[in-house]
Amino acid sequence: MQMITEDKLMKLKSGTDIRGVAVKTDTEEIELTDEVVEKICTAFVIWLRKKENKEDLKIAVGHDSRISADRIKKAAVKAFTSEGVTVYDCGLSSTPAMFMSIVLDIKADASLEITASHHPYQRNGLKFFTKNGGLEGSDVKDILHIAYSAEPGSKEGSVINYDFMTVYCEHLKNRIIDEAADGEKPLENLKISVDAGNGVGGFYAEKVLKPLGADISASQFLEPNGMFPNHIPNPENKEAIASACEMVKKSNSDFGLIFDTDVDRMGCVSSSGEEINRNRLVALASVIALDGNNGGTVVTDSLTSDGLRAFIEEELGGKQLRFKRGYKNVIDKSIDLNHAGVNSPLAIETSGHAALKENYFLDDGAFLATKIVILLAKLNKQGKSIDDLIKNLKEPAESMEIRVPILLDDFKEYGEMVIAQLTEYAEKREGWQVEKENYEGVRINVDGGWFLLRLSVHDPILPLNLENDNAGVSEKIAKELKEFLSSFDKLDLKNFD
């Protein structure tokens, strides 16, 4: 048995979640052992009681389709009940549904989703929610610090098996019926295909779309399978989105949806088989969010295109704040703006995390899908398509990412030094302009486009993103940047080739 140290526990922190190896492989040992899970879940109860000043707690627990889910759930439930908690075992569930268990029906004090999002089958994680939403990174640190010395409780809680996903699906269905305003079957005559990637998202086809009249016959990979045998359940993955596009084209579907494993992210496909992802998804979500919120601010991550800004500000009459990468960063920024009196109805990352003000600023792929489906039903009655809404979005001729590894364990200071020197170089370089409104790394505007060099929060990587309206320009810029970066001996430049 591995000794549990505070350092090992802290290494399980992944942004605002806890993640680690949950299935032994040829090269990896299990990090999320039963004992580790029990310690962390015990610590969460201790932390929550202090935060809420409340003794009797209700906690809802759900999980995605990973093969380690049952084992980890048993360990979590054991820890919770030993602390006297009433546990609502919700079984197979989406991550957003677990937050909604605090808002709807159960009205739990907190919840836990066992998931590692789009990560490989052998990994898993713990994502906790309170009534304020997902935890902050500082909360996770505090819980892991408590976990190191946490001892098992000796109380006797209870376990209630609860089908909360049916409640959640009814909530989404009612939203479509109310807003589409076309009777109990507002999706009749629409063929909508769903690619769930063998994650949790199959419920959206079977329990939301189908009962409302949609033809879901061309949907694929709806069956939960924690080995993910068909493709990675990740809308950003090229193979996954290509599979969803092919699904729509082959079946002549009116629309396609693709979810990640735990359904907090989504992408979609138009009737022509063209993906609506990244900048296009941000544009579509902005159309929805700015309806009735004229002049509202859309907070995005740093990788959005100049064409998207023009679309939001000139076409839709809104404003865009290009903030940091990380879905929690954009959500927290949008919430802060609203607290400061600035109307910000949407926080969205190009990865597909989208949080609407009207939905508790919860990044819920199924809720965004629901808002899009409502729009689809309305447009269908008018003989129009989703494509019509974003046809004026100007997209770049080329877009690429080059990841530059830093060959140091303690990499942050070195990475920041590289960025500082590139900024200095760019300020003197004719034709390059340093973007003033920028919140991470350095973004440089060049003729017809831009590039951004930033430092990864968790990994020893400098991601370099380049985008241009003119084909071939980014390659020339990349060549110059490679030459500039070659003077730094702790950078691995192999990916430039």
Image (cartoon, helix red, strand yellow):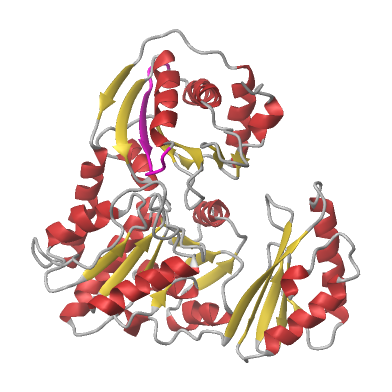
Q: Which residues are magenta?
A: 55-67
Is 363 a magenta residue? no
The location of residue 476, given as percent across then percent down, is 75, 86
Give percent across and percent down for residue 411. Answer: 80, 51
The quarter of the picture where the N terminus appears is: top right
In the depicted structure, whether residue 47 falls above or below residue 164: above
Tell me where residue 317 sits by quadrant: bottom left
In this view of the protein, can residue 344 be seen by the observer? no
Above or below: residue 197 compared with residue 23: below
Tell me: 352 left or right of 252.
right
Side of 147 relative to 357 (left or right): right
Tell which of 271 and 367 is nearer to you.
271
Residue 455, picture quadrant: bottom right
Res. 474 visible in picture: yes
The number of discs equals 0
Residue 250 in the image: x percent, y percent? 27, 78
Asked whether, in this view, residue 48 is left or right of residue 165, the answer is: right
Residue 57 lies in the magenta-colored region: yes
**Nearer to us in this view, 32 or 400:** 32
The percent coordinates of residue 50 (x first, y second) are 52, 21
Query: From the viewer's perspective, is residue 12 above or below residue 158?
Result: below
